[in-house]
């Protein structure tokens, strides 16, 4: 079964860094729950910050607000990825928010609930090495349920992601985040609200696009290196959708193509870009290749459909 090497990605992100928590001094940070967030029972862990880049053991979901200096009325909920066991909070969250700010877009970064990383001795993981250990010895066992799929269903990475223990909690956090942002519409001059998500965050964004209520429906969505398993149909109230990913994405590029076809067949605005020189997890990073233009392409798509 194909697995995303989230741990190698986390190691790359935090190499040479020491956590300081300074990243949360930028913009306003709002808790989504006044008390302890539900869903964990008696299991409580302490959030770990690896170099102001990667977070894990998140049980207290928040929104970090990045107002645009010259707002144009559009807001985006930014949802970083990390396999539902960590968050690439800087590269796929804060850095993306700041790039969107340059376009006049007010951004809100979602820190959503994750699967607790608890070692076999019952103690929580507290550093990268222990996170690797828990991922390999415990977390992957939770995903083994995918091996029990009925024979007529192909085993898909997206199916695995949707069936991790805490993915429903992350979906609830996205619902609550959208409701909260809409409650601030007057304060921030928000007229349109969309989402953009990365990897596991892309799964959260797609879940929102496919399964929502009237008050939690995003006006548009951006899905960055993520997809969905078949059979798949766009909902009756499907919103404009932008997708992009590496051509040889470890996530399985065909899963984003299936989403594209579902939206295209429903005659809903949709656009897809696959970059040949790109790797999973690029976020807002730039390396001189074509994928550096994805935020510009996303904003051009929004402009085509009068969101900018």
Image: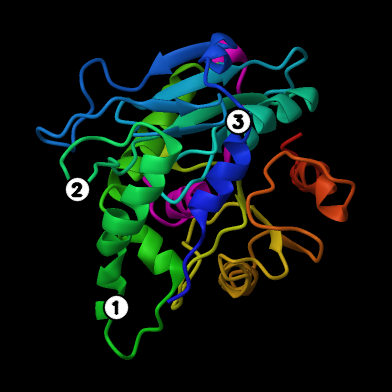
Q: Secondary structure at mark 2?
A: loop
Q: CA distance from mark 2 to mark 1?
A: 23 Å
In the drawing, does residue 175 fall left or right of residue 64?
left
Q: Residue 20: x percent and y percent?
A: 53, 15
Q: Residue 50: x percent and y percent?
A: 50, 29
- 289 vs 77, nearest the viewer: 289
Tell me the residue that label 1 is attached to: 147
Can residue 136 be seen by looking at this rendering? yes
Q: Is residue 128 above or below residue 17?
A: below
- 198 vs 175, nearest the viewer: 198
Range of residues picked out in magenta:
186-214
Determine the residue positioned at 44% across, 57% down: 210
Tell me the residue that label 3 is attached to: 90
The outermost residue toward the left is 42
Find residue 123 and report its image quarter.
top left
Give the mark, 3 or 1, whose residue is nearer the N terminus: 3
Image mark for residue 29: none
Q: CA distance from mark 3 to mark 1?
A: 33 Å
Q: Residues within 10 Å of mark 1 (few under 14, many from 20)?
A: few
Determine the residue positioned at 56% across, 43% down: 11
Give the mark, 2 or 1, whose residue is nearer the N terminus: 2
Q: Secondary structure at mark 3?
A: helix
Q: Residues within 10 Å of mark 2 (few under 14, many from 20)?
A: few
Q: Which one is in front in this view, the residue at disc 2 or the one at disc 3?
A: 2
Give the mark, 2 or 3, whose residue is nearer the N terminus: 3
Q: CA distance from mark 2 to mark 3?
A: 29 Å
- 14 vs 57, nearest the viewer: 14
Q: Secondary structure at mark 1?
A: helix
Image mark for residue 120: 2
């Amino acid at each position: 079964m194909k697995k995303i090497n989230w741990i190698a990605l986390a190691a790359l992100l935090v190499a040479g860094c020491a956590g300081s928590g300074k990243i949360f001094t930028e913009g306003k940070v709002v808790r989504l729950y006044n008390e302890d967030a539900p869903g964990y029972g008696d299991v409580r862990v302490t959030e770990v910050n690896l170099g102001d880049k990667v977070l894990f053991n998140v049980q207290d979901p928040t929104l970090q607000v990045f107002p645009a200096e010259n707002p144009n009325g559009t807001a985006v909920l930014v949802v970083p990825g990390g396999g539902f066991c960590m968050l690439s909070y800087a590269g796929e969250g804060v850095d993306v928010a700041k790039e969107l700010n340059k376009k006049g877009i007010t951004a809100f970064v979602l820190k959503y609930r994750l699967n607790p990383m608890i070692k076999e001795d019952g103690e929580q993981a507290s550093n990268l090495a222990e996170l690797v250990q828990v991922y390999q010895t415990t977390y992957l066992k939770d995903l083994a349920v995918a091996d029990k799929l009925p024979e007529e269903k192909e085993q898909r990475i997206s199916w695995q992601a949707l069936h991790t223990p805490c993915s429903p909690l992350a979906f609830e956090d996205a619902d609550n985040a959208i409701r909260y942002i809409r409650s601030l519409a007057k304060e921030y001059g928000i007229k349109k609200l969309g989402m953009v998500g990365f990897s596991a965050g892309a799964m959260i964004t797609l879940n929102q696009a496919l399964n929502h209520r009237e008050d939690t429906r995003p006006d548009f969505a951006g899905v960055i290196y993520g997809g969905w398993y078949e059979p798949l149909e766009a909902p009756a109230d499907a919103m404009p959708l932008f997708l992009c990913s590496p051509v040889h994405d470890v996530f399985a590029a065909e899963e984003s193509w299936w989403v594209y076809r579902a939206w295209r067949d429903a005659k809903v605005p949709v656009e897809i870009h696959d970059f040949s020189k790109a790797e999973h997890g690029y976020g807002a990073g730039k390396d001189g290749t074509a994928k550096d233009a994805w935020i510009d392409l996303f904003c051009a798509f929004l402009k085509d459909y009068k969101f900018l």
